[in-house]
Image (cartoon, rainbow, N blue to C red):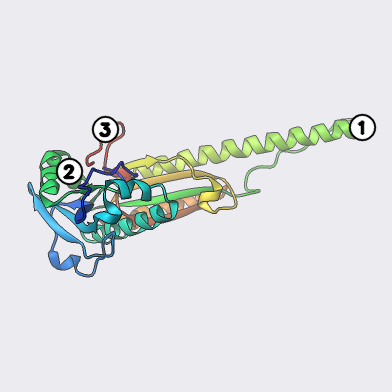
Amino acid sequence: MNGTTAEPVPVAPTLGTGVWLHAVVAEVDPASLVGIAGIAGTPVRAVAGAGLVAVVADVPLTEYGEEALRRNLEDLGWLERAARAHHAVVDALARTVAVVPARLATVHRDDDRVVRALAERHDALADTLARLTGREEWGVKGYVVPGATPRVEEPAGGGGAGAAYLRRRRAQLTAREEGQRIAADAAATVHAALAGHAVAARRHPPQDRRLSGAATAMVLNGAYLVERTRVDAFAALAGELAERHPELRFELTGPWPPYSFVAEPAAEPAWE
């Protein structure tokens, strides 16, 4: 199971309602679901089965049926709104219990299909929930700080203006390459240190500046699964590492729903 967009599960083409799956938990107090709006603005509810609980929302098939959903998933505006609403439910649940987020756009025909899916995926889901219990996902991003790396002096030399220009360009390229190397080494060092204080760690590809909104390049995009009892120590370590590495600017974010840790690399999705 992960937070990526999935092909919609076929649902009945006739008018009626389907069941949108938001997440799976080991157990949940129904009172804690009061006030949480699901994907279509309807209240979320719990569907129990196979010793697990699915948190779902009823959705109209006119918008969330197979054909309608396929069209909507091609609408970036609709997709963004759906992803935001889906995440809001997962985030609300993750504040109190271990949660396995469902893939975006997982729709079942009815509660019986939900229960059957829980039974089919019981072992993988139960193992994941056990691994996540008492733990939180935290993120650390690292960005290059302009001018914080050692300056490469321009080599002296004779010749005319053309030769001087080439020397300057070589010096600039050398400085840029050296800066990139220093930043990459620092990012690797910081990630290793943080991973040593986490239960599990993932190093995601750096985000493009257009997505991150940062003025400089991202060189670290790490996710860390941390024991709740060690969050303060983890945050303190992140602060210490920031002081040791002024060549990078760090952002500590969280806690997040454990999207980075719901399935092991190369494993089959825990939920479809």
- The amino acid sitting under disc 1 is Gly
Q: To which residue does mark 2 refer?
A: 125
Q: Quadrant of the C terminus?
A: top left
Report helix, strand or loop for mark 2: helix
Q: To which residue does mark 1 refer?
A: 160
Gap between marks 1 and 3 measured at Cα? 61 Å
On screen, residue 139 above or below 40: above
Q: Nearer the viewer, residue 238 or 204?
A: 204
Tell me which numbered mark, 1 or 2, is placed earlier along the sequence: 2
Report helix, strand or loop for mark 3: loop
Q: Is residue 153 left or right of residue 238?
A: right
- The amino acid sitting under disc 2 is Leu
Q: Residues within 10 Å of mark 2 (few under 14, many from 20)?
A: many
Q: Is residue 188 left or right of residue 81?
A: right
User: Residue 193 appears in which quarter of the rendering?
Assistant: top left
Asked whether the residues under the numbered discs 1 and 3 touch, taking CB atoms below 8 Å apart as contact, a structural biologist would say no
User: Which residue lies at the image location 32% right of the left edge and 49% below the top edge?
Assistant: 69
Tell me which numbered mark, 1 or 3, is placed earlier along the sequence: 1
User: Which residue lies at the image location 23% right of the left edge and 70% below the top edge?
Assistant: 35
- x, y percent for residue 148: 62, 48
- The amino acid sitting under disc 3 is Ala
Q: To which residue does mark 3 refer?
A: 267
